[in-house]
Image (cartoon, rainbow, N blue to C red):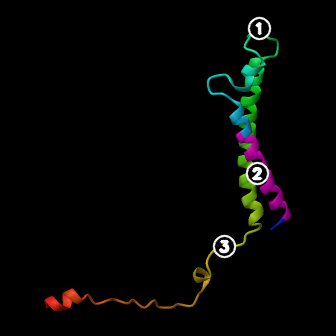
Amino acid sequence: MNDIFTIILFSIIFLSFLLILVIMVQNPKGGGLSSSFGGDSQQMGGVKKTTDFLDNSTWFIACALLILILFSNITLNPGNKSSDSELLNNDNDFEIEEILENNDSENESE
């Protein structure tokens, strides 16, 4: 494996676990990590900013993960190497012999 591909692969694995962690911290009903800092809406810099931070970090990690996955495909097959089969590139013609089996029940009825 290529060194760049290995680094990208470990980055994808790390970001995947980080995305799982950020999603698990959130609560779909507005609780989660933000509710553990206190439920007062008058708290300065409290719940709303934590929820916004978790939401923005989820989108950022998901986008970074998608970009790394797409970039890993480029580093895996650098250049314009064709990944076609040798049979498709072969100029020699060859015949495929067709084998038909006789059905015994058809022969008996005739």
Q: Is mark 3 on a helix, strand or loop?
A: loop
Secondary structure under badge 1?
loop
Which region shows up in magenta? 3-20
Picture disc at residue 42:
1
- Asked if residue 106 lies left or right of residue 11, the reply is left
The magenta stretch spans residue 57: no
Depth check, mark 1 against mark 3: the one in front is 1
| Frontmost residue, 100 versus 86 | 100
Q: Where is residue 80 shown, x and y percent of the image?
A: 73, 69
The mark that comes first in sequence, 1 or 2, is: 2
Report the residue at 67% width, 22% height from top.
Answer: 31
Q: Residue furthest right?
A: 3
Q: Residue furthest top?
A: 42
Residue 90 location in percent, x, y? 60, 86
Q: Residue at x 72, y 32 (%)?
A: 25
Dots 1 and 2: beta carbons under 8 Å?
Answer: no
Q: Do the residues labelled 3 and 2 touch (CB within 8 Å)?
A: no
- Lower sequence index among marks 1 and 3: 1
Q: What is the x, y in percent for residue 82?
A: 68, 73
The residue beneath circle 2 is 12
Q: Give the side of residue 108 with respect to residue 7, left or right.
A: left
Q: Distance between the residues labelled 1 and 2?
A: 39 Å
Name the residue nearer the viewer: 32 or 87: 32
Q: Does the magenta stretch include residue 18?
A: yes
